[in-house]
Amino acid sequence: MNQISGSWQRNLAVVWLSQFISMASFSSAYTFMPFFFRQLGVTGDEELSHYVALFSVAGNLTFCIFAPIWGMVADVYGRRMMLIRANFGGALLMPLLAVITSPDLIIVHRLFLGALTGTVSAAQTLIISTTPKEHRSFALGAIASALFGGMMAGQFLGGGLVQRFGFNWTFAGSGVLLFVSGMLVLIWGRENFTRTETLRERVRSIRWRIPRFGVIWYLMVLFICLGLAREFDNPFLPQLVMEIMDHSPDALSWSGWISGFCSLAGIVSGLLLGFLAGRLPFIRVLVAAIVIAAVLRIVQSMSHHVAGLLVERSLMILAIGGVEPLFQAWLAGATPEREHGSYFGWAACAKAVGWISGAYLGGIVAGWFGTVRYVFFGSGLLFLLLVPLIVATARIVPPKIARKKRV
């Protein structure tokens, strides 16, 4: 059983900093993976699209399988322990990329990393369990800002490290950052958690079948669709930059700049949408953000100037960056407090199903048309299809979002 911490702001600050560092670690290594594949001998555009899609699918596949398991363990041992586990697990595995010399082994490594990490869902579940209901939208938005802030820092840091020291030292540094992130939560993170059952008792009580979520299934479908739409084009941004710049050596630097500005926009988006959702009609905020992002994604597919792509992508992230925390707040309001770990684990699994499907389908579209432009166009259409799904789901599972009283 978990009780709301008396100092939820302090805990939020610790988790925020931890997630900032974690995302800086991952993005410093993963943003430039298409270039790393090139270095390992993957030369053709079609083959590169295949490996980029497979890299994304591999991690999301094992994450999908293990997220509900870690969620169940979190309900027994506490959410803080799961966040520590995810960071230290990544700290052990990330430096191993430095000794891998085959693109196929990178995919195998990604499978193991996806199974053992998952810092984002662990952090979100911890914050949900330690934050008063009326502050949850803001708190989750703040965590989203940490994710984007960390990504921005990691992209700038990773770009500089790769160009100056190479990929191997970048991967080693990534592991160090994850270790620091885990130590922050271990030393200063707090959770008033009281264990009410053992893991063995919890496992024995499980009926090994698809869970009976009732109307919560509609929210799970939304998580799948959101994950699919977001991951449909995300892995292929560096390739779009390379295509626009005709494979110029400066493409790596521009990819870092674009990702960095997008992360800055995401910081603002997480805080802004969390603020608006606590004061304006929840569904209107969601729908407006998704429609704007859909239009800007379609515009990106027609971009022929890298500076224009930077502006378009940044504005798109400004609109959409804080949407996922709103989905999390929606789920939290519709599920029992004592089972948030399990429900959030299944939600993470649902997102991963969407990520797998999106990356795989995006890779097929890129290979079919011979250009990633159609991937970005298709992503915009998928976001537009989310709108009627959100409106229909809100009628079945009305959002229970505590609104702040205006002073």
Image (spheres, rainbow, N blue to C red):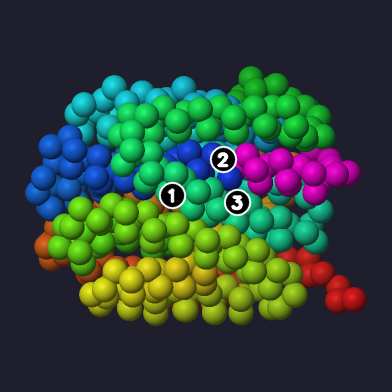
- Does residue 288 appear anywhere in the picture? yes
Neighbours of disc 2 within 10 Å: few (<14), some (14-19), many (20+): many
Observer-side mark, 2 or 1, equals 1
Looking at the picture, how far across and down is residue 132, in whole percent? 81, 53
Which amino acid lies under the numbered mark 1 shown in the image of this protein?
Phe
Looking at the picture, how far across and down is residue 129, in whole percent? 74, 45
Looking at the picture, how far across and down is residue 391, in whole percent? 55, 76
Which amino acid lies under the numbered mark 2 shown in the image of this protein?
Ile
Q: In the image, which residues are magenta?
A: 1-19
Q: Residue at x 18, y 57 (%)?
A: 248
Which label sits on residue 275? none
Q: Residue at x 80, y 61 (%)?
A: 134
Q: CA distance from mark 3 to mark 2?
A: 9 Å
Magenta stretch: includes residue 121:
no
Q: Earlier in the sequence, mark 3 or mark 2?
A: 2
Badge 2 is on which residue? 21
Vertically, is 69 above or below 392? above
Which label sits on residue 156? 1
Which amino acid lies under the numbered mark 3 shown in the image of this protein?
Ala
Say which quarter of the image contains residue 140.
bottom right
Q: CA distance from mark 2 to mark 1?
A: 13 Å
- Does residue 325 appear anywhere in the picture? no
Tell me whether the residue at label 3 lies in contact with that at label 2, contact meaning CB atoms closer than 8 angstroms: no
Observer-side mark, 3 or 1, equals 1
Say which quarter of the image contains residue 102.
top left
Say which quarter of the image contains residue 19.
top right
SS at mark 3 in the image: helix
Spot the residue most to the left: 44
Question: Viewed as shown, does residue 310 lie left or right of 51?
Answer: right
Badge 3 is on which residue? 146
Q: Residue at x 59, y 37 (%)?
A: 71
Q: In this rendered view, identify the residue nearer to me: 71 or 307.
A: 307
